[in-house]
Amino acid sequence: MNFLMTIIPFFQASKLNYKLVILVSLFLFSSCEKVINLDLKKAESVIVIEGSISDQIENQFVKISKTTPFTESNTFNGFKGANVNIITPGGMPITFIEVSPGLYRSQRLKGTPGQTYKLEILADGKLYTASSTMPLPVIPDSVGFKKLSFFGNANIYPTVYYKDPSGVQNQYRYLVKINNKYQADIVSEDRFNNGNAVSDVINYDGDDLKSGDIITIEMQSIDRNVFKYYFAISQIGGNGGPPVAPANPNSNISNGALGIFSAHTKSTLSIVLK
Amino acid sequence: MLFLKNIFLTCFLLLFFTINSKSQDNYTINGIVKDSLSGETLIGVSLKFNGKVQVGTSSNAYGFFSYKLSSGDYDLSVSYVGYRTINRRISINADTKLDLNMVPDNILDEIVISSEKRNDNVVNAQMGVAKINLSEIRNVPVLFGERDILKTLQLLPGIKSAGEGNSGFYVRGGSTDQNLILLDEAPVYNASHLLGFFSTFNSDAIKDVSVFKGGMPAQYGGRLSSVLDIRMNDGNKKEYTAEGGIGLISSRLKLEGPIVKDKGSFMISGRRTYADAFLAFSGDSSIKNNTLFFYDLNAKANYQIDEKNTIYLSGYFGRDELGLNETFGFGWGNTTATLRWNHLYSNRLFSNTSLIYSNYNYVIQNFLQENNFKVNSSIRDMNLKQDFQLALNNSHNIRFGLDLIHHTIAPGKITASASSSVNEVAVQKRKGSEIAAYISDEWELNDKINLVYGLRASSFFLFGPGNFYRYDADGKTNSTRAYASGELVKNYLNLEPRISASYQLNGLSSLKSSYTRNTQNLHLMSNSTAGSPTDLYIMSSNNVSPEIADQIALGYFRNLNEDKYEFSAEMYYKKMQGQIEYRSGTDLRGNRNVEADLLFGDGRAYGIELFLKKRFGKINGWIGYTLSKTERKFNDINSGQWFLAKQDRTNDVSLVGIYRASERWTFSSTFVYNTGNAVTFPGGKYQLNNTTVFYYPERNSDRMPDYHRLDFSATLEGKPNKKLQSSWSFGVYNLYNRKNAYSIDFRDDPDDKSKTQAVRTTLFGIIPSVTWNFKF
């Protein structure tokens, strides 16, 4: 999927048209942006769960929070006192302990690729469950850079090289840091390049890269539902998109909770831009 | 509605008996109405015969009319906007052939309102129809001074713009793909250029535009909301002429003339934009090497073989091209071709046979070495129409025919070179046919009541070859079945009754009512409000049922001040089934399982439309107002509750004024106001992996800010009586520079990541334009 984004950063299905519209209108003289005040409704708070288990020996985390009104600051509104367990394929519960408000941590342990894990959370007397199957790992060969220019803006983008396994459907997620500052969270899939040597260009809206920057990329293999969840978020987009009716992405968690539970493999590469 | 259908069928049968039992009329009068200077046939010309009773008819889409009259003397009055009215006394004592040549009258305001009535709008049973006069299109101010049929249409009540500067439109709560747009009978799938800012219709090449918002006549079908029937010019039969214009964005040229004088003629009209020409002035090579333009070409030829046979060949070809620095190319466009044969079986039976081709496609290309690829997608129609118009007697005009259309949709095929990391993928083509038969009768029941009633039986067939899937409730593939070429996969049959009636309250006013059912078997998958070049169409299938709409409407029509003013009020209620949305996170690109992610629901729309138009005089123009509501209901959206559709706008006002200040100066102005569209704004937010994600509790429960805008234009005609006639048009779009919201986005404040903000994007501020037009 990312091969499309290689070419235009805005080739996200929903954003393409919109970005082009802006582009065309720029051509035809004018288009401008302004921050405005809107009187937004304050919806009742909803529970948000973000849980994961990886194939690395480490502390696994589950974050539980509640939504906050638009006008408040962007803080993690942690939910205290939940009962959190991940159930292994053998039926054994792994108990998570709350280490700070809303942050729940397991012992150091790892999941096994190919296995299905269940998440069970008891919060406010409600039971939330989810399950996710950890895909087999795909290890990146290397990270490089590509210079692309669009209407006068030339930018350097990090690029991940890997061999996509043939015959299976794969989904990937990239978490990108520049100089240890978090920059991007992007998903891709192998629908158009299954089984090939792939170069995924990481198109992100963050800080421009410059010489001496350290780029760290965590590549995850994620399951289909997790991919669809993040893909839906990218379609709605926080930074534009046509005036479509945005909606909450479909969560794999039951009982109306927002968020996602992901069993994934991961590997991390770092590179310095010369 | 089943009840209504039964009643309707009963009436229908009854009527056939009445018709058969009654044929005491004597003579047929028929002929063709033409422009006296160019020989162009004129569409919709009103003919009134005043004898013992007053009766009348109008010319059809080929200028032909036929009418049964009993013997006697009549005062014939032939009238048409922009032409001198013909008043003539005729004696009917045999079948009569009467060809009429009307003299164009450039000076609208000096038309003497004679005793003849210009009250077709009141008398006619047809409702929910609007005609745009091409002289109005010429004078109404538009963005960049580009005359545009679709944008002028949006100034009529019940027809709403799909967005700023956009040629897409919503009719009575329907979405943009529910409009049937016909150019010389050929369906046009993407009616916009440059992502919606310009329509594909070059108004130089257009003769007549009608839009049906409700009460669709039975010969039209295949879309739920409206029919936009656009007819191209035939070409001047008398002499060679050229006309054109040079504007800020584009230039146009039209040539026309006789092939054989008075027998046949041709017309060819082209247009190209050159906005991207300015890019070449940029020193920056990454800007210089981009392309962005569109062009289109309309051509038509006709030849009258003899008194009874005329053939027409017409076509359209248009294309948009966007290229970024030799790394990326994107092109899209429509091609249509129509071959028509008019034949008179007798002086009462007119026949038209049309063979139609329409194709829309887009190509996306990536030229980067290791990721190169090319995406091709297309939708192609082959269409045969056979239409008969029979003047049965002086109170019945029958129309019947067949409409066969074959669709081939290639949703997407990806090709790449061997060195590319991209695999070649093709989503299977889909083939389907729509077969419809229709019959309708225009019946002058008595002095007070006119009826148009008919039935359209439409069936849809989806054929193999291909793999067809069944899905479970979660959208997972349940079973797959391979069908052979030509094997029937699914079939739907729909009966679509159409009826409208008018009741004359007096010579000046009438009440009208209509009921129509429309069905649609081609469905547009689109996430965005405006038409996108990559819009994907799917057909009805084993997973997707036809969309069905039932509409009832009631109207009051009145002319005032000797027909100088026309007023109408129409109320409508529309119920829609089989409406389509899709699950969040659905990727339409190269996706063979799109149908798995669809959600099906209902829709309803209702409203009232008021329209007051001043038709003649130094100052003319109109005011339109619409009060309406449009809702949708899906089990999996908004907890199954009704929610406002994205095209819902409570209030919508348009004002158009045209002032002929002198022989040479014309000023015009438009003002539009509408309630902001229904949209979904966040009701909260949360942090997911340190990123802000917004929470949307309800669908479309918020509103965009109100939209309003004032435009102005002035046209200076050159000195008359010169060989070269020329004119200047000056325009200002958005005169008071209103910052209308094209979109409102939500994001983290770039200067303070701990806060979120709402950002409004405005596309067009105040924009001046100038165009020079010529004709010789």
Image: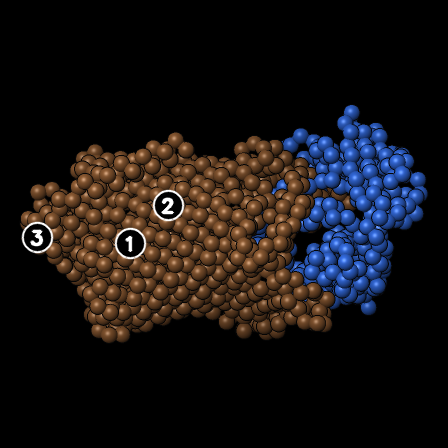
Query: Which residue type carries mark 2?
Result: Arg
Q: Name the residue at 22% across, 64% down.
A: B308
Indicate left or right for B573 with B50 as reference. right
Give the foreground label among 1 and 3: 1
The chain in blue: A
**Marks 2 and 3 on same chain:** yes
Question: Which chain contains the residue that carries disc 2?
Answer: B
Read off the residue under disc 2. B456
Q: Quadrant of residue A139?
A: bottom right
Read off the residue under disc 1. B388
Give the foreground label among 2 and 3: 2
Indicate left or right for B646 with A156 as reference. left
- Confirm whether residue A88 shows in the render: yes
For chain B, give the colour. Answer: brown
Q: CA distance from mark 2 to mark 3?
A: 36 Å
Query: Which residue type carries mark 1?
Result: Phe
Using the image, determine if residue B729 lies above or below residue A109: below
Q: Name the residue at 59% across, 44% down.
A: B598
How packed mark 3 is, by other alpha carbons closer than 10 Å (few <14, some 14-19, many 20 or more), is some
> Residue furthest toward the top?
A125
Q: CA distance from mark 1 to mark 2?
A: 14 Å
Q: In terms of sequence position, does the residue under pointer 1 or pointer 2 come before the other?
A: 1
**Marks 1 and 2 on same chain:** yes
Read off the residue under disc 3. B92
x, y (%) of residue B402? Answer: 36, 53
